[in-house]
Image: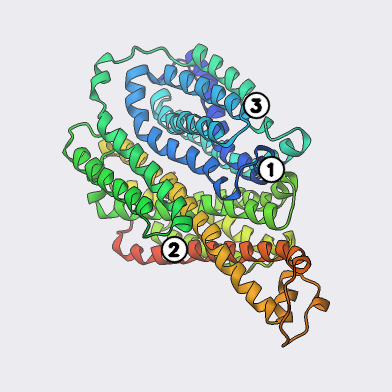
């Protein structure tokens, strides 16, 4: 793509760029709208609850693989045709998701969606600097940034409304018409370029394959560990494959003259700290978007629209804090903002770790406000911290790796969270049952069982009728306790990562923007 300066051509380019922003908006929105409808999809497709997180992790893993390929594909196809092909693939995959009636094809189509979405997002921000002269780049960045923030704000309520008004299938079908329109407009309006056939032989396919195998085997290993045990042969084998592939990937990438990911940039301490912050943020960010619908859908029994309405609080808080974060990010040391942002985000995560089976929407407002307010402070300052001191020629590749780390954290984090939820639930169930059998009326009250069935200090006989009565209460209480532990895990990790801040140097505030 070439920078356009003439007024008519620039106006047409703006139309093409807005079409690209619509594609990016769809890709970001897709994670949010699906999250609120996890329970509805699980019931409709008859998927085991402990497999539901694959709908999100499959998307995120595919994005992780696609992000470092974006530069290569841009050189090979041109940015214009890459966007058209990616949007087409996204639409086809969306139709495939809607047509799926079982777990396996749904996850497969989600992988294709994630791969397409993974190229759409970085392409937009790269296009800002390729399509526009310096005087227009600020406006283009603002348009892209607003849509990137708006998507997670409206996503929960939009997803809930679509599912309850129509069906969960329309969560995916809603992408098709705007996707087709965006692809046509981009094809007609974006500047034409010539592809670079010489780029065809520059991709390290073996490194890419090792990255994909490492991510897949790690996810499967983390998923199987709660059922089969961490010391079981399958889990050890999968983790060994992960380690071998990571080692091979690192060796080849560091030795390559044209790596798919420039790992040498991690030698810059400032950039390394930023990447770790991005990784941990991914765990908390995507983890919270997953944990809330699981609790509200499976424990509280609320529908997708109710879940979306409750989760709207986080998005509104994020939208409200965005201008404040932008203003302060341009004027203060990023380490101060990062410390405050991650501390507030950790507090929001930690407050959610005290939920009970009767926790309602009102009790979830404050944790959401804290998390939503903190998100922009956890996104913008770490970006400047990581990229602000790098040589200009290293910034494009480093930016891709930095953003990749957030998605990687989300994918791995969801697998760990699932391990906590479904690995610990059985332990909590046994504990609750033992308390009930001992006649612990306080435990009965806590999980919502009528206390008249229990006499304090006296053992209770669990006949079949009693077991059938208490089983739903025990299950909900056990999964709530496990969800609380997952919230605690994310909160502690978010606090611990602050210990890295002293290792980073400050960067100058940019007060003249």
Task: Give the distance between the C-alpha atoms of the residues marked 3 and 1, in whole angstroms.
Answer: 19 Å
Instruction: Return the residue at label 2.
Output: 493
* Residue at point 60%, 39% (across, down): 151
Please indicate whether residue 257 sits to the left or right of residue 406 in the image: left
Front residue (pair 497, 241): 241
Q: Tell me if residue 282 comes above or below residue 199 in the rendering.
A: below
Please say whether residue 344 is visible from this viewpoint: no
Instruction: Return the residue at label 3.
Output: 173
Please indicate whether residue 315 sits to the left or right of residue 287 in the image: right
> Element at badge 3?
helix
> Element at badge 2?
helix
Q: Find residue 80 and report its horizontal and vertical position in percent.
A: 43, 18
Query: Marks 2 and 1: which is nearer the front?
Result: 1
Q: Are marks 3 and 2 in contact (CB under 8 Å)?
A: no
Compare marks 2 and 1 and give the one earlier in the sequence: 1
Please say whether residue 351 is visible from this viewpoint: yes
Instruction: Return the residue at label 1.
Output: 43
Q: Find residue 184 and report its horizontal and vertical position in percent.
A: 55, 14
Front residue (pair 46, 481): 46
Task: Give the distance between the C-alpha atoms of the residues marked 2 and 1, in whole angstroms.
Answer: 32 Å
Q: Tell me if residue 353 comes above or below residue 511 in the rendering.
A: below
Please indicate whether residue 180 sits to the left or right of residue 385 in the image: right
Quarter-wise, where is residue 402 in the image?
top left
């Amino acid at each position: 793509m070439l920078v356009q300066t003439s007024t008519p051509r620039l106006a047409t380019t703006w139309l093409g760029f807005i079409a690209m922003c619509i594609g990016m908006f769809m890709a970001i929105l897709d994670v949010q709208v699906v999250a609120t409808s996890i329970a509805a999809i699980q019931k409709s497709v008859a998927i085991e609850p402990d497999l539901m997180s694959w709908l999100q992790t499959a998307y995120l893993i595919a994005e992780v693989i696609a992000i470092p390929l974006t530069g290569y594909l841009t050189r090979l196809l041109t940015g214009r045709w890459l966007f058209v092909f990616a949007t087409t693939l996204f639409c086809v995959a969306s139709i495939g998701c809607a047509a799926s009636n079982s777990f396996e094809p749904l996850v497969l189509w989600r992988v294709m969606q994630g791969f397409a979405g993974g190229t759409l997002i970085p392409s937009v921000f790269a296009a800002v600097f390729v399509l526009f002269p310096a005087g227009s780049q600020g406006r283009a960045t603002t348009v892209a940034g607003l849509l990137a923030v708006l998507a997670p704000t409206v996503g929960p309520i939009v997803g809930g409304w679509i599912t309850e008004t129509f069906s969960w299938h329309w969560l995916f079908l809603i992408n098709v018409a705007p996707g087709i329109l965006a692809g046509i407009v981009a094809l007609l309006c974006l500047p034409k370029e010539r592809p670079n056939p010489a780029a065809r032989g520059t991709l390290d396919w073996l490194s890419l394959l090792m990255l994909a195998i490492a991510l897949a085997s790690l996810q499967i290993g983390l998923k199987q560990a709660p059922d089969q045990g961490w010391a079981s042969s399958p889990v050890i084998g999968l983790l060994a494959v992960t380690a071998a592939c990571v080692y091979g990937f690192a060796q080849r990438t560091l030795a390559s003259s044209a790596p798919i990911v420039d790992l040498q940039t991690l030698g810059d301490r400032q950039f390394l700290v930023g990447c770790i912050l991005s990784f941990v943020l991914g765990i908390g960010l995507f983890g919270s978007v997953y944990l809330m619908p699981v609790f509200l859908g499976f424990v509280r029994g609320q529908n997708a629209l109710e879940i979306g309405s409750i989760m709207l609080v986080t998005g509104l808080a994020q939208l409200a804090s965005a201008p404040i974060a932008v203003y302060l990010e341009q004027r203060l040391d990023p380490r101060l903002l990062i410390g405050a942002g991650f501390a507030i985000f950790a507090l929001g995560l930690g407050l959610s770790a005290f939920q009970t089976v009767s926790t309602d929407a009102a009790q979830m407002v404050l944790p959401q406000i804290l998390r939503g307010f903190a998100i922009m402070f956890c996104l913008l300052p770490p970006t400047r911290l990581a990229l602000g001191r790098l040589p200009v020629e290293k910034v494009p590749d480093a930016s891709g790796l930095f953003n990749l780390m957030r998605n990687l954290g989300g994918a791995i984090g969801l697998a760990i969270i699932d391990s906590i939820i479904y690995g610990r639930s059985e332990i909590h169930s046994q504990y609750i049952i033992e308390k009930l059998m001992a006649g612990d009326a306080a435990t009965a009250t806590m999980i919502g069982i009528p206390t008249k069935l229990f006499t304090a200090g006296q053992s209770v006989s669990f006949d079949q009728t009693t077991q059938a009565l208490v089983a739903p209460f025990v299950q909900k209480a056990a999964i709530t306790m496990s969800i609380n532990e997952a919230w605690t895990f994310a909160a502690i990790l978010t606090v611990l990562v602050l210990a890295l801040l002293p290792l980073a140097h400050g960067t100058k505030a940019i007060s003249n923007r």
